[in-house]
Amino acid sequence: MTIERYLTTDEKILATAGSFYATNKRVIRYRKNIMGEELHDLAYSHLTSISYTNRSRVALIDLGIFIAMLGIIGIVVNIFLEERLVTPISGAGIGLGVLIILIGIFSKTTYMQFRGAGVSDAEGRKLRMANVNTKDAKIFISLVREHTVAGKEAGAKLGISG
């Protein structure tokens, strides 16, 4: 099956970026794999914001600090036990920890997040656009913003707040 079976009769796909589709009515994330299909959508009338996130990988930094600390503890223990084997292993631990910290700092995680009224954080995470060509994402976001603004302006003319 394809995404078309989930569209309403007067709904048309205007743009795609990865597994995201912008229609004339809503943003849809549709994925199909061997485990089945997954569809999440957000009507433009419920869209409250689109955010861009580019940050360091905190989990990697934490792991690197932990490994480096184990290495430092190993060196301190080595001073008291005078066990020669611990020093090279501890030094390698410190080096590995520092390397993982640097990877965490310099390898960023980047995504666009669609947020909607009444959408929980857990549900909202399903509306994250990650690993998408930047040019495609910018075009997609511009189109979504145009439809969001147009929908709110039409609602204001009818006396509907959105």
Image: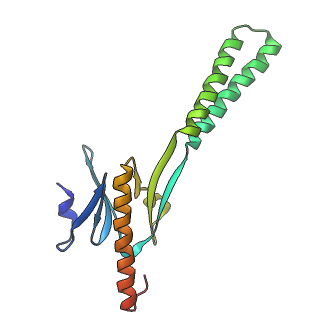
Residues 74 and 64: in front is 64
Say which quadrant the N terminus sits in.
Answer: bottom left
Q: Quadrant of residue 77?
A: top right
Left or right position of 52 against 41: right
Q: Is residue 53 left or right of residue 2?
A: right
Q: How is the image coloured?
A: rainbow
Counting from the top left corner in percent of width and height, residue 54 is at 52, 50
Q: Quadrant of residue 156?
A: bottom left
Q: Residue at x 73, y 7 (%)?
A: 84
Residue 16 locus on image (x, y percent): 28, 57
User: Does residue 105 sit above or below 21 in this rendering?
Assistant: above
* Residue depicted at 38% across the width and 83% down the height: 153
Is residue 110 positioned above or below 143 on the image? above
Q: Which residue of the protein is positioned furthest toward the right in this rendering?
A: 80
Question: Which image quadrant: the C terminus?
Answer: bottom left
Left or right, 33 with reference to 124: left
User: At x 33% / y 54%, what residue is drawn?
Assistant: 136
**Residue 139 drawn at (x, y percent):** 34, 60
Q: Position of residue 130 (x, y in %)?
A: 41, 50
Q: Is residue 58 above or below residue 72?
A: below
**In percent of the image, x 49 and y 57: which residue is there?**
52
How many numbered discs, if any? Answer: 0
